[in-house]
Image: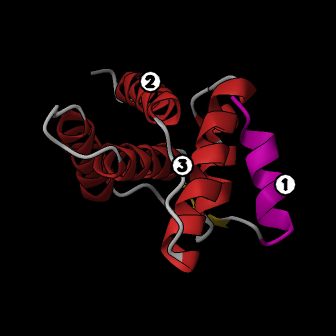
Amino acid sequence: MGDQQLENLVRIGQLKTEPPAEAEIQGLVHSGLRRLDDAERPELSLESPFDLAYNAAHALALAALRFRGFRSESRYLVFQCLQHTVDLPVEQWRVLDQAHRKRNLAEYEGYMDVDEQLVAATLRVARQVAARVKALSGD
């Protein structure tokens, strides 16, 4: 599943190969799942579930990449690789791309521009990523 595309990214210096580390992968999955659960707490402001869902999706996407034996230092690329690591449809990882752009605006320019629709979509896609990552390890 997509290993040739991932190897091509290694060749051009976008990814690094690194043997999977079970403890790291499990830690990332645990972190992602906890954040997803926390993101659904109704008492939180809109920005908090967005941050939690975005960071959950990133942890889970990184776990999938690490499971396949690769590492990236680019958040965007970790999301983009989801179509190769867990066969996530392009339209779903594009939701994470949109969330990534919104997150960068908030982090680097202090402008948080999220709405309930984006938060719900980010949560939905993060849950899909979680299910696919769990399937990698047979859980």
Disc 1 designates what residue?
Answer: 8
Marks 2 and 1 in Cβ contact (< 8 Å): no
Residue 98 - label:
none
> Under tag 2, what secondary structure?
helix
Q: Residue at x 33, y 21 (%)?
A: 138
Within the magenta stretch, is there residue 57? no
Q: Quadrant of residue 87?
A: top right
Q: What is the x, y in percent for residue 81?
A: 67, 45
Disc 2 designates what residue?
Answer: 124
Q: Residue at x 68, y 56 (%)?
A: 77
Marks 1 and 3 in Cβ contact (< 8 Å): no
The residues colored magenta run 1-13
| Disc 2 residue type (three-letter) | Arg
Q: Determine the CA span between mark 1 and mark 3.
A: 14 Å
Marks 3 and 2 in Cβ contact (< 8 Å): no
Q: What is the x, y in percent for residue 94?
A: 69, 36
Q: Depth check: give the residue in front, 138 or 96.
A: 96
Q: Quadrant of residue 40?
A: top left
| Disc 1 residue type (three-letter) | Asn
Among numbered discs 1 and 3, the one appearing first in the sequence: 1
Q: What is the x, y in percent for residue 20?
A: 43, 55
Among numbered discs 2 and 1, the one appearing first in the sequence: 1
| Disc 3 residue type (three-letter) | Leu
Name the magenta segment's main secondary structure: helix
